[in-house]
Image: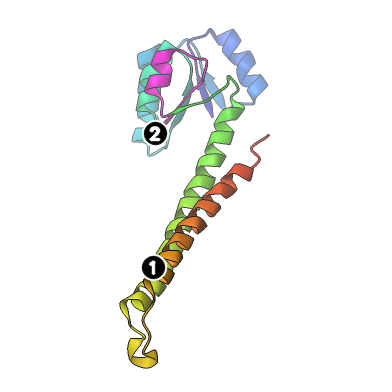
């Protein structure tokens, strides 16, 4: 974690120590922030940028993921991928955790829907008709499809119970 700031070195140093950062670059102009991010990306790094001001807009838009502080400048919020609701840097960690949980939930829902359809579409198509001489009643097929949708919604709803407090 590196802090890029337009502030002077003394201020940046104090903040870097308080936040236990790996490093900092102070007195950086907006175009230099952009260049720093592009250099990291050229080296194959994935870059997340957190900013709140007009000076951060270029860097926020160039980063792989831009986080704007919710009470920041409108141009910073518009340039970022994610707008955080507060002014706490802890919101970044919460957003990352929530996004990973959401992505995992999407994969679970896709896998469940795929498995469900892989099993039940052949049944609905009459694959077992030659053996059992029975077809699926359309009412039961509709209920099964609704049950699939309800399962996806219930699985996604589990994210509401996730505690993101640090």
| Residue under the point 45% across and 55% down | 107
- Marks 1 and 2 in Cβ contact (< 8 Å): no
Give the image quarter of residue 35: top left
Give the image quarter of residue 37: top left
- Quickly name the residue at label 2: 64
Position of 126 with respect to 5 (left or right) is left
Give the image quarter of residue 164: top right
Q: Which residues are magenta?
A: 64-81
| Label 1 packing within 10 angstroms: few (<14), some (14-19), many (20+) | some
> Can the viewer see residue 111 in this picture?
no
| Residue under the point 40% across and 73% down | 120
Q: Position of residue 14 (x, y in %)?
A: 64, 14
Label of residue 91 in the image: none
- Quickly name the residue at label 1: 117
> Can the viewer see residue 117 in this picture?
yes
Mark nearer the viewer, 1 or 2: 1
Q: Position of residue 50 (x, y in %)?
A: 49, 24
Q: Quadrant of the N terminus?
A: top right
Q: Quadrant of the C terminus?
A: top right
Position of 18 with respect to 79 (left or right) is right
- Residue 131 sits above or below residue 154 on the image: below
Q: Seen from this angle, which residue lies furthest bottom?
A: 131
Question: In the rendered structure, which disc, 1 or 2, sits on the residue that comes first in sequence?
Answer: 2
Mark count: 2
Q: How is the image coloured?
A: rainbow
| Label 2 packing within 10 angstroms: few (<14), some (14-19), many (20+) | some
Alpha carbon of mark 1 to alpha carbon of mark 2: how far? 35 Å
Badge 1 marks a residue whose secondary structure is helix
């Amino acid at each position: 974690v590196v802090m890029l700031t337009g502030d002077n070195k003394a201020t940046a140093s104090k903040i870097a120590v308080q936040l236990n950062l790996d490093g900092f670059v102070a007195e950086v102009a907006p175009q230099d922030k952009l260049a720093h991010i592009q250099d990291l990306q050229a080296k194959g790094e994935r870059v997340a940028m957190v900013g709140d001001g007009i000076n951060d807009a270029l860097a926020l838009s160039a980063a792989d993921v831009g986080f704007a502080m919710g009470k920041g400048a409108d141009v910073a919020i518009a340039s970022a991928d994610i707008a955080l609701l507060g002014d706490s840097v802890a919101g970044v960690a919460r957003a990352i955790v929530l996004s990973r949980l959401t992505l995992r939930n999407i994969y679970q829902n896709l896998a469940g829907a795929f498995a469900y359809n892989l099993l039940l579409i052949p049944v609905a198509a009459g694959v077992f008709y030659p053996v059992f001489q029975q077809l699926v009643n359309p009412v039961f097929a509709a209920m099964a499809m609704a049950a699939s949708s309800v399962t996806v919604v219930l699985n996604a709803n589990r994210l509401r119970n996730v505690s993101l407090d640090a």
